[in-house]
């Protein structure tokens, strides 16, 4: 019996590790498509990415061209963790990241958190085994978990946060972002200057510190102007168009309908515009709408969207230069955030409140 067990163990130990061919077969796509999903995911349609990412999890495949380079001390790979490669704002951030990575001779390993392509344990294993020379965190909620980010042994792996502080555990890492609270306060001040008093705010996920900063800026502006925030005028849109449509319908059904709605990002503002028009109302005639980010679609919406501009490409570049400083120094020499400038972009989605609403 012992011999047969040992023989079975030898057989199981001798099995070939999962390959990219296995992933392609299970996902029903070509090997080239799997490679694109790993290395250039924004070129692949979301449903196909999802199938490939599910197959990677099912097989346990690790795109490990890295093992030999570990022994040489450098992987020449940077891991980028972001919510969605299809998000217009992060697409622009990624263009800056890619530019600097190419300049430095590095490849990118992209982890998209909305599809849960890697569990916290899997990412933690990559951190511990140094399957990348550094990590850029762009996700609104960190996929690492407290134990990964806060472990002293893992702090040897350089991490830079882009766009926002993703979690309280990540506050000890260098970051590059705008002053979200100040920007939101300026936008709310602008709406108040236009005569608005009942201003609603649609935020993202409850766990997102980014949208909390923007909500804090909105609250600070309202408080400074002596304006009360009526119950029900702050609601969640989960950073998606669909959820924001539902959130906007709730606001439009409020006993005292808001005259202006501040959305925590431009994609939510798109959903807000759709819901207002579907209700037979006009923007800005009945309700003014503003967003945040100034994505490339903002100026061609109907009406063109008033929003906060973030220098997305510059953020991507600055994050990478900061990360390479960390890699070269081998430690965090400066964890102070690098604040890049923002500006209000005034377009046609804001007007003074209608006199009939009062």
Image: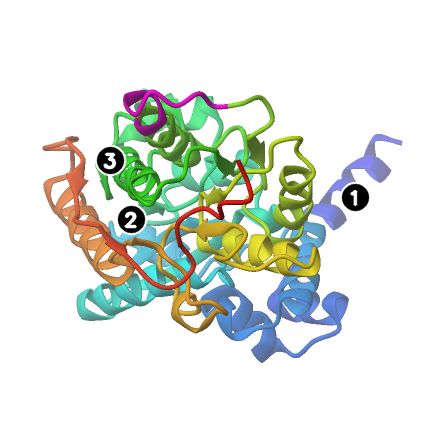
- Which residue occupies the foreground of this view, 81 or 19? 81
Horizontal and vertical percent for residue 44? 57, 73
x 37%, y 35%: residue: 214
- Give the left or right position of residue 106, taking residue 215 as reference: left
Q: Which residues are magenta?
A: 221-229
* Kind of element beneath mark 3: helix
- The quarter of the picture where residue 119 lies is top right
Please give the name of the residue rendered at 48% of the width and 69% of the height, measured from the top-left corner: 301
- Residue 345 x/y as whole percent: 28, 58
Task: From the image, state whether disc 3 or disc 2 is nearer to you.
Answer: 3
Mark 1 or mark 2, which has the lower sequence index? 1
Of mark 3 and mark 1, the one earlier in the sequence is 1
Above or below residue 7? Residue 151 is above
Q: Kindly identify which residue carries mark 3.
A: 182
Residue that appears at 55% across and 67% down: 37
Residue hosting label 1 = 7
Say which quadrant the N terminus sits in.
top right
Q: Nearer the viewer, residue 25 or 228?
A: 228
Q: Residue at x 36, y 31 (%)?
A: 213
Q: What element does badge 2 sit on?
A: loop
Q: CA distance from mark 3 to mark 1?
A: 67 Å
Give the quarter of the image for residue 29: bottom right
Give the secondary structure at mark 1.
helix
Q: Quadrant of residue 171?
A: top left
Relative side of 43 to 336, left or right = right
Task: Tell me if residue 117 can be seen.
Answer: no
In the displayed image of the protein, which residue is found farthest to the front? 356
Q: How many marks are shown on the rendered structure? A: 3
Q: CA distance from mark 1 to mark 2?
A: 39 Å
Instruction: Give the x, y percent position of residue 304.
Output: 42, 67
């Amino acid at each position: 019996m012992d011999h047969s067990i040992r023989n079975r163990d030898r057989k199981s130990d001798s099995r070939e590790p999962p390959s990219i061919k296995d992933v392609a077969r299970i996902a029903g796509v070509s090997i080239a498509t799997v490679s694109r999903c790993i290395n250039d995911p924004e070129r692949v349609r979301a449903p196909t990415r999802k199938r490939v990412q599910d197959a990677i999890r099912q097989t346990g495949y690790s795109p490990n061209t890295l093992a030999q380079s570990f022994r040489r001390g450098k992987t020449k790979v940077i891991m980028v963790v972001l919510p969605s490669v299809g998000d217009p704002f992060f697409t622009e951030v990624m263009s800056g990241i890619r530019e600097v990575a190419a300049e430095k001779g590095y490849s990118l390993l992209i982890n998209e958190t909305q599809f849960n392509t890697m569990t916290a344990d899997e990412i933690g294993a990559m951190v511990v085994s140094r399957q990348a020379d550094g990590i850029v965190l762009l996700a609104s909620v960190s996929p690492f978990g407290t134990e990964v980010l806060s472990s002293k042994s893992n702090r040897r792996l350089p991490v830079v946060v882009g766009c926002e502080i993703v979690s309280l555990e990540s506050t000890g890492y260098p970051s590059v972002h705008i002053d979200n609270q100040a920007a939101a306060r300026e936008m709310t001040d602008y709406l108040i200057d236009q005569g608005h008093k009942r201003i609603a705010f649609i935020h993202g996920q409850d766990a997102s510190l980014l949208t909390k900063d923007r909500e804090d800026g909105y609250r600070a502006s309202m408080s400074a102007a002596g304006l009360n925030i009526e119950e029900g005028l702050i609601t969640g849109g989960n950073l998606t168009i669909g959820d924001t449509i539902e959130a906007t319908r709730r606001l439009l059904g409020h006993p005292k309908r808001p005259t202006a709605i501040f959305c925590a990002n431009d994609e939510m503002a798109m959903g807000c515009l759709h819901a207002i028009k579907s209700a037979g109302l006009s923007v800005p005639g009945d309700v003014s709408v503003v967003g945040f980010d100034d994505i490339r679609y903002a100026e061609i919406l109907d009406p063109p969207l008033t929003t906060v501009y973030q220098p997305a490409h510059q953020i991507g570049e600055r994050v990478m230069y900061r990360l390479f400083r960390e890699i070269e120094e081998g430690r965090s020499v400066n964890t102070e955030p690098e604040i890049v400038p923002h500006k209000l972009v005034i377009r046609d989605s804001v007007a003074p409140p209608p006199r009939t609403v009062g």
